[in-house]
Amino acid sequence: MKVLLIKDVKGLGKTGEVHEVKDGYGKNFLIGKGFALHATTEVLNKHKAHERKKAEQEAAEIEKAKEIATTIEASKLTIKHKVGANGHLIGSVTNKEISEALVEQLSIEVDKKQIHLETKIKTVGIFNVDCKLGHGIHATIKVDIIAEV
């Protein structure tokens, strides 16, 4: 009996694989417990169509992330922050502030968890900040911190 695995099965295979198994194992355990479907041509065609659709969605997401990366690389953010008497910032610039500035200035929504600061920004100046956009795509944005009067 041929089955299409819809969940990973230890000792047999991963999701999406087709395997030849004994009838009792296939019907009673794999199909009975919801780990697999009977691999008919209809089921296999639906699976292939689903995989194609999933690949197209992933390609669209990658393309969108690349567009956002080029926009981020070409631009510069300006953030005003309060400065103390010694010239240092009161507090530090956070991922959340950078995320909000991206939305305000560039209309690009990047989650604060995707913005990586190597060190805390506690002084006025220009800093490079890494943004992880998913699918292994990174963008570096220049952030200009200026003193708020």
Image (cartoon, helix red, strand yellow):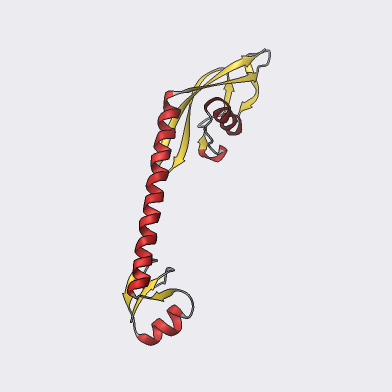
| Residue visible at 39% across and 81% down in the picture | 26
Instruction: Indicate left or right for 34 with 120 as reference.
Output: left
**Percent of width and height locating residue 25:** 40, 84
**Count of numbered badges drawn on the protein:** 0
Quick one: 112 or 51, which is closer to the camera? Answer: 51
Quarter location, residue 2:
bottom left
**Percent of width and height locating residue 50:** 39, 60
| Residue visible at 59% across and 31% down in the picture | 100
**Percent of width and height locating residue 51:** 37, 59
The quarter of the picture where the N terminus appears is bottom left
Whether residue 52 is visible: yes
| Residue visible at 66% across and 17% down in the picture | 83
> As drawn, which residue projects farthest toward the front?
42
Whether residue 135 is visible: no
Residue 119, above or below 63: above
The quarter of the picture where the C terminus appears is top right
Quarter location, residue 31:
bottom left
**Percent of width and height locating residue 73:** 42, 27
| Residue visible at 42% across and 36% down in the picture | 138
Instruction: Indicate left or right for 119 with 39 as reference.
Output: right
Residue 101, above or below 13: above
Quick one: 142 or 49, which is closer to the camera? Answer: 49
> As drawn, which residue projects farthest toward the bottom?
24
